[in-house]
């Protein structure tokens, strides 16, 4: 642009500026022109400063003409800015266009975790026997976790090397992370009149960690309370469950005497298996494998929950969900359940709809 040192030839200057603005091809160059003309030290701004040295009449006329010039420049810049902005947007839309006719990106099929699958199987089997699912808190009082279940003060399970204790509350009492799901049995009996028939799947916590133990794991407890319940009912219920869960008709099941503070008499439940060749095969051979604990509910537990032991009897059982999942699906190490390894999930996981039923159904026995 030609340097203008006086107030003359404003029309020529306006035409020169309009041509310069129209020839700009980028927003950055347009901004540079705006600053050069209208900025603090721009050409038109400097001309405005010259008005102070003019006589009043000339200053009035020149001021009007300069203001009109500023308005024309601002309007021209705004129009060019709109055109350049639209062009830049169109260029960006063209560059970032998505061809919706292309096939979608491949995606990995979701898998159901073996623990979720096993819990569904267990719940489905016991649901056919008339059981309902009960739930309770993970953080329990000493009373519900130990005392109400007839676990004595000196029992090793009450020690800190076995149980996770929380800091004392305002009353100096320490709650625990429940070591089993049995407290839910107590809570249910306190709130329910017999008959009771529940299963309690859920998380439990113990201070233990190796290939077959985890600080957090899952258990499923079962409880039946009614008038006239006896050991034969327990026997038939668990035989039916074992055969349905492992899908083996005629699976050998035996009850071996044991001891639990909350049941009397108590029994471990074993299933038949063979370990020939270093492998484990369930349902064949003359070997045995323990899978769960059971027994008739101790009369003291019934009394603690407000039931009359002279009138009502019941049985209870409990199993580790990880343990029975490892046995059924051939998983060698419990710790891998919690590694969040997608390769492990692809191998052991289940497609959500890969089978019409999650279990083989009840296959015999008495309940």
Image (cartoon, rainbow, N blue to C red):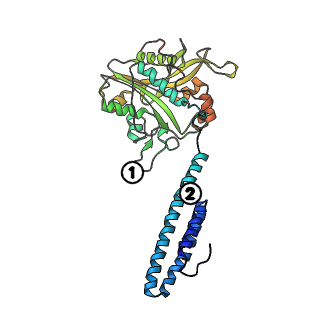
Foreground residue, 35 or 71? 71
For residue 169, which numbered disc appears in the image? 1
For the question of whether residue 211 can be seen, the reply is: no
Q: Nearer the viewer, mark 1 or mark 2?
A: 2
| Direction from residue 265 to residue 248 in the image, left or right | right
Q: Position of residue 12 (x, y in %)?
A: 56, 72
Q: CA distance from mark 1 to mark 2?
A: 69 Å
Above/below status of 33 relative to 327: below
Q: Are marks 1 and 2 in contact (CB under 8 Å)?
A: no
Look at the image and tell me in which quarter the N terminus lies.
bottom right
Name the residue at the right extreme: 277
SS category of the residue bearing label 1: loop
Q: Position of residue 179 (x, y in %)?
A: 47, 37
Q: Which residue is mark 2?
A: 84
Foreground residue, 259 or 233? 233
Q: Of the two numbered discs 1 and 2 on the same chain, state the one appearing first in sequence.
A: 2
Tell me the residue at 37%/30% (across/down). 301
Q: Position of residue 305 (x, y in %)?
A: 33, 32
For the question of whether residue 247 can be seen, the reply is: yes
Tell me the residue at 39%/36% (across/down). 136
Tell me the residue at 58%/29% (across/down). 349
Above/below status of 247 relative to 43: above
Look at the image and tell me in which quarter the C terminus lies.
top left
* Displayed quadrant of residue 17: bottom right
Q: Residues within 10 Å of mark 2 (few under 14, many from 20)?
A: some
């Amino acid at each position: 642009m030609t340097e203008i040192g006086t107030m003359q030839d404003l029309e020529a200057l306006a035409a020169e500026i309009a041509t310069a603005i129209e020839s700009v091809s980028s927003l950055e160059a347009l901004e540079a022109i705006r600053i050069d003309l209208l900025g603090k030290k721009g050409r038109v701004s400097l001309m405005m400063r010259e008005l102070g040295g003019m006589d009043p009449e000339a200053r009035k006329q020149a001021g009007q003409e300069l203001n009109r010039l500023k308005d024309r420049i601002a309007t021209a810049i705004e129009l060019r800015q709109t055109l350049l902005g639209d062009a830049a947007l169109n260029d960006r839309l063209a560059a970032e266009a998505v061809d919706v006719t292309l096939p979608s990106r491949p995606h990995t099929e979701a898998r159901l975790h073996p623990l979720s699958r096993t819990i569904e199987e267990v719940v489905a089997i016991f649901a056919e026997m008339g059981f309902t699912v009960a739930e309770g808190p993970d953080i329990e009082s000493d009373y519900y976790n130990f005392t109400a279940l007839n676990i004595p003060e000196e029992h090793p399970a009450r020690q800190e090397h076995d149980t996770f204790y929380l800091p004392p509350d305002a009353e100096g009492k320490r709650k625990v992370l429940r070591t089993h799901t049995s407290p839910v049995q107590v809570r249910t009996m306190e709130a329910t009149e017999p008959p009771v028939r529940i299963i309690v799947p859920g998380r439990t916590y113990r201070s233990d960690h190796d290939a077959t133990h985890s600080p957090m794991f899952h258990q499923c407890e079962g409880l039946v309370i009614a008038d006239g319940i006896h050991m034969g009912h327990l026997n038939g219920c668990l035989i039916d469950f074992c055969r349905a869960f492992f899908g083996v008709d005629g699976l050998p099941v035996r009850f071996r005497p044991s001891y639990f503070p909350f049941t009397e008499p108590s029994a471990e439940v074993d299933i038949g298996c063979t370990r020939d060749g270093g492998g484990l095969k369930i349902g064949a051979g003359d070997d045995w494998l323990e899978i769960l604990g059971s027994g008739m509910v101790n009369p003291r537990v019934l009394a603690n929950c407000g039931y009359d032991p002279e009138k009502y009897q019941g049985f209870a059982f409990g199993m580790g969900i990880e343990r029975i999942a490892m046995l059924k699906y051939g998983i060698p190490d419990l710790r891998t359940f919690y590694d969040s390894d997608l390769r492990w999930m692809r191998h052991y996981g289940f497609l959500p709809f890969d089978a019409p039923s999650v279990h083989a159904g009840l296959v015999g026995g008495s309940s």
